[in-house]
């Protein structure tokens, strides 16, 4: 698979995964909503963190596009400034956590070197950074009154969503075969892991340059 196609599918896959996770969250956890857009369980936050950990900058681009789509068409159709800010902040926080993991944990696309403790650290770091960025924006624009309660509910929602997604995918990736086998399913799973590693290596090389 060419580098261009890998980038395209990384971005597209992130966008689709985010939209699907948002739909599931609204269907299953709609009763956990604190205010519009802030839930006590928010699965899309897990997709945000996981996609950037897996494919880096491509994941951030996919999240930005997904955020613009959902913000303009669903969350804030009559507030373009809030829609753009939300999409940008929602993709910035997980990307900064990805850069942290790249620098201090020698991150790999398969996440094989991320221990449960490291996954927890990254999930907590993201769950603090994302609501912090959003609430700094809220404070500057004066769009929230119950700052602490809103921050805490977003933190809890981001953390639960991130942990659910991270540990689920971590477990799935751990089951991927280490080498090719004769079965069609195993070969397919191996190719997924290989594609992830190539996409990640492309991102790493770009940042080194």
Image: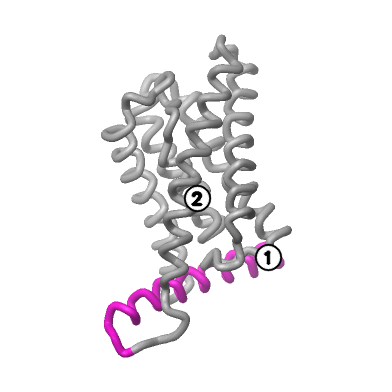
| Residue at image location 55% in from the left, 13% down from the top | 144
Task: Say few, some or many: other residues with alpha carbon within 10 Å of mark 1 (under 14 / 14 to 19 / 20 or more).
Answer: few
Residue range in magenta is: 182-209
Locate residue 77, reporting x and y percent.
36, 24
The x and y percentages for residue 106 are: 68, 65
Query: Which residue is drawn at the image coordinates 53% and 42% (left, top)?
Result: 91
State the image coordinates of residue 202 (x, y, percent, origin top left).
57, 69
Quadrant holding the N terminus: bottom left
CA separation, marks 1 and 2?
A: 22 Å
Judge by depth and name the residue closer to the eye, 160 or 130.
160
- Disc 2 crowd rating (10 Å Cα; few below 14, some 14-19, many 20+) is many
**x 64%, y 48%: residue:** 121
Q: Residue furthest bottom?
A: 182
| Residue 187 inside the magenta-drawn segment | yes
Q: Residue furthest top?
A: 145
Q: Is residue 108 above or below residue 153?
A: below
Label 1 vs label 2, nearer the camera: 1
Splitting the image into 4 quarters, where does residue 145 fall?
A: top right
Q: Is residue 180 above or below residue 119?
A: below
| Residue 193: numbered disc | none
Q: Is residue 41 above or below residue 175?
A: above
Q: Which residue is mark 2?
A: 61
Instruction: Find residue 108 and report its image quarter.
Output: bottom right
Q: Is residue 176 left or right of residue 152?
A: left
């Amino acid at each position: 698979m060419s580098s261009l196609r890998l980038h395209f599918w990384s971005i597209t896959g992130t966008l689709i995964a985010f939209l699907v996770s948002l739909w599931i969250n609204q269907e299953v956890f709609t009763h956990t909503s604190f205010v519009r857009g802030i839930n006590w369980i928010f699965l899309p936050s897990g997709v945000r963190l996981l996609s950037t950990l897996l494919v880096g900058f491509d994941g951030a681009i996919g999240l930005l596009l997904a955020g613009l789509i959902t913000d303009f068409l669903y969350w804030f159709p009559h507030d373009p400034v809030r829609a753009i800010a939300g999409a940008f902040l929602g993709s910035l926080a997980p990307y900064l956590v990805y850069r942290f993991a790249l620098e201090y944990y020698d991150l790999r696309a398969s996440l094989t070197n991320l221990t449960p403790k490291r996954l927890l650290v990254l999930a907590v770091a993201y769950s603090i950074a994302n609501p912090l960025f959003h609430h700094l924006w809220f404070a500057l624009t004066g769009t929230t009154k119950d700052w602490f309660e809103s921050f805490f509910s977003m933190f809890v929602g981001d953390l639960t969503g991130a942990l659910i997604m991270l540990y689920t995918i971590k477990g799935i990736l751990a089951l991927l075969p280490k080498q090719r086998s004769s079965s069609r399913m195993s070969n397919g799973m191996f190719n997924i892991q290989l594609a992830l590693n190539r996409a990640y290596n492309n991102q790493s090389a770009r940042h080194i340059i």
